[in-house]
Image: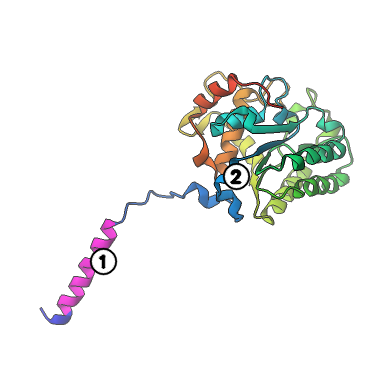
Amino acid sequence: MTTLQRSAQFLFLLSMAACCALPPEAPGEVALEDSLPGDPRWREDALFERVLVLGASASAGFGLNQDLGTVTAAAFGIESSGVLTIASSFFFMRPQKNGRAALEKAREFDPTLVIAIDFPFWFAYGRRQEAQRSGLMNLGLELLDSLDCPIIVGGVPDMTAAIGLMLTKEQVPSIESQEQLNRQVLDWSDERPRVAFYDLRGSQRKVEGGPRQLRGETWPPEGALILQPDRLHPTLVGLVGLVLEALEEVGLGQHIKGTPTEILEIARELRRNR
């Protein structure tokens, strides 16, 4: 064997040894934090110092003893008093006025993280002309934009099934409008590194497909419902799934403490923290 051949063989064996020394990578495995937006505050410990839940009746825990804030506290493993909920079941009556009032309180709190999953809802829904919905949504997003901190914002779901129960036909945008408004929220969030978009509409389609895997468990548990009889508001099981899926989707899943079942049990012992 020539000197050149021996050198080539040595380099080949050396490269193979280096490859074998590397830990195997699971197919499709991506670090959760890799999906976080670009703002560095998403990756700082201070992110969880002052958590604020901002929104309408779903966040307020309509029909429940708990709200989205208590479920969030249970998910992060912190005291419920460590998460402030500014949400109202009457948000739909005057979304602009109620939104401004909520944002004033929010700025006083000076949050380090805002969870606004259903804040955009009544800027999309409500009794108004279809042509007015996009402009009103812009106003709602401008309100959110006044908060200089990381924000998780939800998209626009399809709540057509609630017509005749909790919603009137006039309050529900057409499917085309819903999709356009959902894209409007997504585009707004994509332009802001401090904002993460939670695909509430896509999540809804998964729920309609039946039980699914959530952090290693089948969710919802057998016999449990995601929505209340009004087909609009989540049950406590629904709120738990909503929070956990949102945190997972935006890249904060590594901060969740416990399984969905454990978090559900903790949340059941808590009361609204407003």
Q: Is residue 10 magenta?
A: yes
The colour mode here is: rainbow
Q: Quadrant of the C terminus?
A: top right
Dot 1 corresponds to which residue? 15
Q: Neighbour class for label 2 at 10 Å: few (<14), some, many (≥20)?
A: some
40 versus 226 height, above or below: below
User: Can you tell which mark lies on residue 131?
Assistant: none
At horizontal 68% and vertical 55% (from top left) the residue drawn is 192
Q: Residue furthest left?
A: 1
Camera-nearest residue between 160 and 237: 237
Inter-mark Cα distance, 2 to 1: 42 Å
Q: Tell me whether the residue at label 2 lies in contact with that at label 1, contact meaning CB atoms closer than 8 angstroms.
A: no
Q: Position of residue 127 (x, y in %)?
A: 88, 35
Quadrant showing the N terminus: bottom left
Q: Which region of the structure is painted magenta?
A: 5-21
Q: From the viewer's side, name the closer residue of 270 and 90.
A: 270
**In the rendering, at what x and y percent does residue 269 appear?**
58, 19
Amino acid under disc 2 = Leu
Q: Earlier in the sequence, mark 2 or mark 1?
A: 1
| Closer to the camera in the image, 33 or 126 | 33
> Could you tell me which secondary element the residue under label 2 belongs to?
helix
Q: Residue at x 76, y 40 (%)?
A: 108
Q: Tag 1's secondary structure?
A: helix
Q: Position of residue 35 (x, y in %)?
A: 55, 50
